[in-house]
Amino acid sequence: MKVEKLLSTRARIVPGYYALIPQEGRLENVLPNLENCKASIMAAPKLGAGFVSYVLQMQGDGRTTAPFGGESGIEMFLYVNEGMISITVEGEQKKLEKGGYVYTPPGAKIEFESCGIQSELFFYKNRYIPLEGKEPWLVWGDVEKLEWEMCDGMDNLFSKKLLPSDIAFDIGFHILLFKKGGCHSFVETHVQEHGAYILQGQGMYLLDTTWSPVEKGDFIWMGSYVPQGAYAIGGDDFSYIFSKDCNRDIEL
């Protein structure tokens, strides 16, 4: 292979503040207890994130070789973006197709394997912030069974909420869908951090004071107080799944 043009990238990294990681710049990692599975670590404390996000590319025979997770205080979320997997959480087994997901409460262990086809997973783990008298619970879901809700009264921006609106949960997951011409109703600036994975289409994304083109397969990490906003471009719908810390006060 011979490179015949200047190297370039759409990646923009400001450690501790924000990051845009395009699909073509991702590296693959070998992780313990994963077989025939390529793992890209998208967000991590080394970047400044308070959580870890992965994109997992599983072959048709990809699987865990031992339970994944189980660390005290660690919660996890897994979303199937392509393919189909069989997953077991604390002895409960289900098959998840595209759009299927599971949230596991702190300390739970999971095992999963592809069902004979290549699968792509968006995976997240975080240290749970306890709240006296409250405990989150195991949540299985399918985005295809959730209704779209209009955002901010706009007729071309919709969302789906993937986890319950209960104070026991210290994170939330949503999918935003921008129809043609859709955009945020204002530029957001807030304490919550996000990890966003582009599921389809193309858009322009504002991070701090710069707009950047983004497309399917890109990952965006937004730290606290990063001015942010997006709008769709092209003729296709633009959507992404994102995490959001919530329901907790600020510790001093």
Image (cartoon, rainbow, N blue to C red):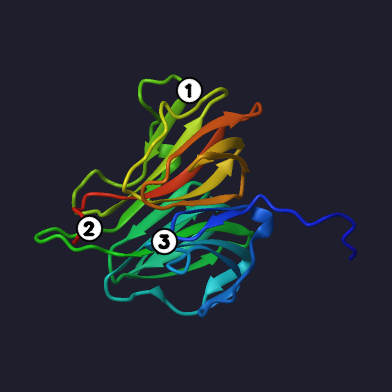
Asked if the residue under mark 2 is in contact with the one under mark 3, i.e. CB atoms within 8 Å, the reply is: no
Pointer 3 or 1: first along the chain: 3
**Residue 208 screen position, x and y as percent:** 48, 43
**Residue sitting nearer the eye, 117 or 189:** 189
Q: Residue furthest left?
A: 133
Query: Which residue is labeled 1 in the image?
Result: 156
Q: Is residue 244 above or below residue 71?
A: above
Q: Nearer the viewer, residue 209 or 85?
A: 209
Q: CA distance from mark 3 to mark 1?
A: 31 Å
Residue ID for mark 2: 136
Q: Position of residue 77 (x, y in %)?
A: 39, 58
Q: Which residue is at the far front? A: 209
Q: CA distance from mark 3 to mark 2?
A: 22 Å
The kind of residue on which mark 3 rests is Ala
Q: Residue at x 56, y 34 (%)?
A: 238
Judged by depth in the image, the label closer to the viewer, 3 or 2, is 3
What secondary structure is found at the residue carrying circle 2?
loop
Residue designated by label 3: 49
Q: Is residue 86 above or below residue 63?
A: above
Marks 3 & 1, CB-CB < 8 Å contact: no
Image coordinates of residue 227 in percent, x first then y, are 43, 41
- If the image is split into quadrants, where does the C terminus sit? bottom left
Q: Residues within 10 Å of mark 2 (few under 14, many from 20)?
A: some
Separation of disc 1 and disc 2 at Cα?
Answer: 33 Å
Of residue 101 and residue 161, the one placed in the foreground of this image is 161
At horizontal 52% and vertical 38% (from top left) the residue drawn is 239
- Three-letter residue code for mark 2: Pro
Amino acid on which disc 1 is placed = Asn
- Give the mark nearest the N terminus, 3 or 2: 3
